[in-house]
Image (cartoon, coloured by chain):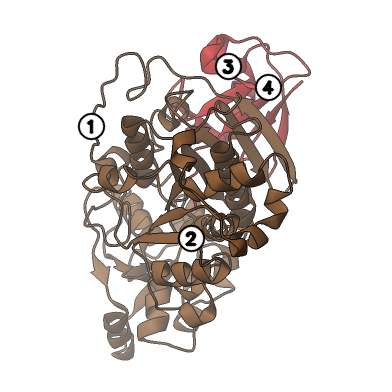
């Protein structure tokens, strides 16, 4: 589909480029597809990035470099060592700082001629419409299902294009969802997967370069959209498999029964997306993951250490994968490795006579294992709260945190 | 034989394979053959006998929901793709 004019010509009347800007954007200006008129469109445009993480890093840096006049960033998080393998807008010196502070500094260093607006809050149904309203294009670089559905719905309700990118391990997806011209995210994914079925990057890992590739493609699509050139990704979904280095494209159709952009929409305002997806949208959320059948008995690392030091007999079951065991483990305390997927078929290896402490990286998988084992009649089980990472932080700093 | 492309999130359940050859004249039969070769995939694709609502299956470039769904005919040189919901960023 050929791109329609996003920036109205009248909006360009007062836009000028200084001599400094002309020099900076020279390699754009000498291309007829951009030229002075195109560069002024970029300067007149406003783009909102949801997330300043893996996808947000290359997006923010390239959009700033390209001279997008106004760039908004939404992210509530602080920079962490585990971010640095892929979130290249932040550096080692930024660990512990708010991501937006660090991102804004990098962007203004790349290009002081752009305006950077920061929203240092979790995106929610209460603030999304107000935050999105002033921007021409929204770019979805978030890392969870609730915020993806929220971003989609807010874009549909406001009639704004949503440049979508998503990543997992070695796999990337790219599209533009714009209900006024084609399908939306819900047309493709009417319902989220059940909680726990699709791991997040924090649980499943991600190749550090992958968000660079996908984020750069999102930036490309946003810039084409503003310039009104080329063929847009509306109605198309690009699938990128980095492991096989394959790009595949499929056609997307607008679903007439789509609950938000279909012929008879049933979603006419923003909803509770954490409840819809059954998972929390961010680390500060009070939402408790659905379908878990309540909480499981917990033990803190300090309490576990105290009981082991007192000579109590406890069986430690590690339910992570072998490659995680190689990073850190509690074998010196007698821990046994049975990966989560094998626990049920290897239940006979578990000693029911002794109280069992189940442990994973940060406490999620081990809680799920306890709930499964409870269904099979196991009792006397405790979940190591915060997993081996919290144990490493609070009890045994000789172990690495990952 | 029809080729089914397995996305990264489902490869742990397909023995790590990304492309799997299956037999069957329809999308439904091809997926049934897939899950008989790799039973661990079944719970991720089906709920009872029905394809899970969040699983997208494309025949070549087209969403089978807008063709004949599970009844859509497939032939030897076709490629079926399972497109996953992924949310990382």
Drawn side of residue A354 relative to residue A220, left or right: left
- Return the chain for callout 4: B
Point out which mark residue B28 bears. 3
Using the rendered view, name the quadrant where residue A78 is placed: bottom left
Binning the other alpha carbons within 10 Å of mark 4 as few (below 14), some (14 to 19) or many (20 upward) gives some
User: In the image, which lettered chain appears red?
Assistant: B
Residue named by callout 2: A114
Q: Are marks 1 and 4 on the same chain?
A: no
Residue annotated with mark 4: B60
Residue under the image location 21 percent in, 57 percent down: A286
Earlier sequence position, callout 1 versus callout 2: 2
At x 36%, y 46%, the residue is: A147
Which label sits in the foreground, 2 or 4? 2
Q: Earlier in the sequence, mark 4 or mark 3?
A: 3
Q: Residue B64 carries which label?
A: none
Task: Establish whether labels 3 and 1 are both on one chain.
Answer: no
Which residue appears at 49% of the width and 29% of the height? B55
Report whether mark 2 lies on the same chain as mark 4.
Answer: no
Numbered marks: total? 4
Instruction: Decide if residue A325 is in sight here.
Output: yes
Q: Colour of chain A?
A: brown
């Amino acid at each position: 589909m050929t791109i329609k004019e996003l920036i109205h010509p009248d909006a360009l009347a007062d836009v000028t480029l200084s001599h400094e800007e002309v020099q900076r954007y020279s390699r754009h200006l000498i291309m007829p597809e951009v030229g002075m008129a195109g560069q002024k469109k970029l300067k007149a445009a406003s783009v909102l990035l949801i997330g300043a993480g893996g996808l947000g890093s290359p997006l923010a840096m390239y959009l700033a470099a390209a001279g997008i006049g106004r760039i908004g960033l939404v992210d509530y998080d602080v920079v962490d060592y585990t971010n640095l393998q892929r979130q290249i807008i932040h550096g080692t010196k930024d660990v512990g700082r708010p991501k937006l502070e660090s991102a804004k500094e990098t962007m203004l260093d790349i290009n002081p001629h752009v305006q950077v607006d920061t929203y240092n809050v979790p995106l929610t149904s209460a603030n999304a419409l107000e935050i999105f309203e002033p921007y021409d294009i929204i770019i979805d670089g978030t890392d969870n299902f609730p915020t993806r559905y929220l971003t989609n719905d807010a874009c549909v309700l406001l009639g704004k294009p949503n440049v979508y990118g998503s990543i997992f391990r070695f796999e990337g997806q790219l599209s533009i969802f714009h209900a006024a011209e084609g399908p939306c995210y819900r047309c493709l994914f009417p319902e989220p997967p059940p909680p726990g079925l699709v791991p997040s990057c924090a649980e499943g890992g991600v190749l550090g370069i992958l968000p660079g590739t996908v984020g750069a493609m999102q930036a490309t699509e946003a810039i084409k959209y503003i310039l009104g050139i080329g063929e847009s990704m509306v109605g198309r979904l690009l699938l990128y498999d980095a492991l096989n280095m394959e790009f595949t494209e499929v056609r997307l159709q607008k679903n007439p029964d789509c609950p938000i952009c279909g012929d008879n929409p049933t979603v006419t305002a923003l909803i509770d997306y954490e409840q819809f997806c059954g998972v929390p949208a961010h680390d500060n959320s009070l939402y408790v993951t659905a379908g878990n059948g309540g909480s499981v008995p917990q033990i803190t690392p300090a309490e576990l250490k105290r009981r082991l030091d007192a000579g109590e007999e406890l069986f430690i079951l590690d339910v992570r994968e072998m490659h995680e065991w190689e990073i850190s483990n509690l074998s010196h305390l007698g821990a046994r490795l049975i990966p989560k997927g094998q626990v049920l078929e290897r239940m006979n290896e578990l000693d029911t006579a002794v109280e069992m402490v189940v442990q994973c990286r940060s406490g999620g998988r081990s809680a799920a294992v306890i709930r499964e084992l409870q269904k099979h009649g196991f009792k006397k089980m405790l979940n190591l709260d915060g997993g081996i990472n919290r144990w490493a932080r609070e009890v045994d700093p000789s172990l690495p945190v990952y | 034989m029809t080729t089914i492309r397995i996305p990264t999130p489902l490869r742990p359940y397909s023995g790590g394979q990304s492309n799997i050859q299956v037999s069957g004249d329809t999308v439904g039969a091809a997926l049934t053959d897939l899950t008989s070769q790799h039973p661990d995939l079944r719970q991720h694709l089906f709920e009872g006998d029905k394809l899970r609502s969040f699983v997208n299956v494309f025949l070549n470039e087209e969403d089978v929901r807008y063709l004949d769904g599970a009844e859509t005919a497939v032939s030897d040189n076709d490629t079926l793709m399972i497109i996953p919901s992924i949310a990382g960023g």
